[in-house]
Image (tube, grey):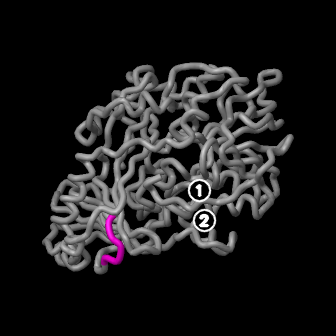
Amino acid sequence: MPAPLLHIDTTPDLPEAAEVVVIGGGVVGTFTAYYLARRGVSVALVEKGRIGGEQSSRNWGWCRQQNRDARELPMATKSLDLWDRLASEIGEDPGFRRCGLLYLSNDEAEIARWAKWRDFAAGEGVVTHMLGESEARDRGKATGRTWKGGVFSPSDGIADTSRAVPVAARGVMKFGGSVHQFCAARGLELEGGRVSAVVTEKGTIRTRTVVMAGGAWASSFCRQLGIRFPQSAVRSSILAVGPHVEGLPDALHTAEISVTRRGETGGHTLAISGRANVDPTPQQILFAREFVPMFAKRWRALRPGGTEGWRSGHETAARWRLDEQSPMERMRILDPRPDARLVAETHRRALELLPALRGTAITASWAGYIDATPDGVPGIGEVTGVPGLILAAGFSGHGFGIGPGAGHLIADLASGAAPIVDPKPYHPDRFAASAWGKVADF
């Protein structure tokens, strides 16, 4: 794969039974399994491909409170505390550090929105520094430009997208859970309407509780059980340059370009915030009405895509049998082609904005599918009508940073513990109503 990823060895044999089975080895599913294992719950994590192989290793790596929607902010704050502890708990570094995030702008309306968010977040205990012209120029000296203002959020940070989720999976095994790669979950068995087992390509695991954390695959999986979960994915492209470029902020956002230092290599990832391709799929047609508010708010950043999504099968409207090959087995890892024009534009913008990058070449480029809900906030909670099935999907591009907090919350729900944050804003029952007026601002 073009996106760097730490490959790990996992558990070879499926257990016959587990208290909880987590489907999906991305950041949310892996942290859910991790926090269950830490509290002594027998848990099996099953992943159709490699741990962290899809969007969890293809994002910017930002772990932020800054500009979070009010519904997500408590989870983001808890997540940063959990990120802080992870290396000492597991004994291996996930590459997290609180380097601070820098936002620069020449748009007075944008700066005013950031200031309004700062005033709201101050009441939630979040420290954000608004930057005037001179402060923005000093912190943004790598650009060689003047700026009308900006924001610096000192307690936010980044983690290594190539390492974080595989390291957390090793933590699952360290604390007694099992992790199974190349083991697709085909569906569920029910008894009396309640979850009784997960059927995988390698065998059946008896269980009373299942967490569906399948990312972009979640809705098509739910459809097999007659569950309607409105979900749609866009294809985001990103590139890497370097290594050994000095003098740049570890994490910088501007309207032109966003830049993040990558792990130990000294290289950087580059992206244009919000820009993505919409690849038509059967599922997008099915949920078109629900996503009108989202599209109306963000259409300027989206571009028509191609047939990548249709061919990949993650948003199929088809149904399959539990004793036959599933779409997840035919497409182990979603690895769509990046948009070549967008990659070229991203690189051009970066070279114009940051002189230190001039002379560097693109070392890699990749794409991933960001799965979203109609309001841009994840769906987390037990599915009404299917006791024992907890949905955790639709993280709308925010999943990596809030992954530890989300995983902790889901582990709380699965084990009956007091929830780390209020789960009500995330419950998927809300998707039965319109998202007009509720689409996340950030």
Which residue: 64% across, 53% down? 30
Name above or below for residue 367 compared with residue 61: above
User: Which residue lies under the disc numbered 2?
Assistant: 82
Does residue 118 show up magenta in the picture? no
How many numbered markers are drawn? 2
Vertical position of residue 100 compared to residue 186: above or below = below
| Direction right: furthest residue | 16
* Dot 2 and dot 1 residues touching (CB under 8 Å): yes
Quadrant of the image occupied by residue 248:
bottom left
Please name the residue shown 42% across and 27% down the image: 310
Measuring 51% from the left and 52% from the top, which residue is drawn there?
A: 56
Q: Residue 382, located in which quarter of the rendered image?
A: top right
- Per the image, is 242 magenta? yes
Give me the residue at 29% from left, 37% from top.
297
> Tag 2's secondary structure?
helix
Magenta residues, dominant SS class: loop
Marks 2 and 1, the one that precedes in the sequence: 2
Label 1 CA crowd tier, 10 Å (few <14, some 14–19, many 20+): many
Which residue sits furthest left?
Answer: 146
Which span of residues is magenta-colored?
241-245
- Viewer-side residue, 297 vs 418: 297
Residue that mark 1 sits on: 405
Q: Nearer the viewer, residue 190 or 298?
A: 190
Q: Amino acid at mark 2?
A: Leu
| Residue 153 percent location from the top left of the image | 38, 69
Q: Is residue 14 left or right of residue 359?
A: right
The image position of residue 134, as x and y in percent, is: 17, 78
71 left or right, relative to 12: left
Q: Position of residue 68 (x, y in %)?
A: 42, 54
Residue 353 x, y percent position in the rendering: 18, 66
- Label 1, secondary structure: give it: helix
Amino acid at the residue labelled 1: Gly
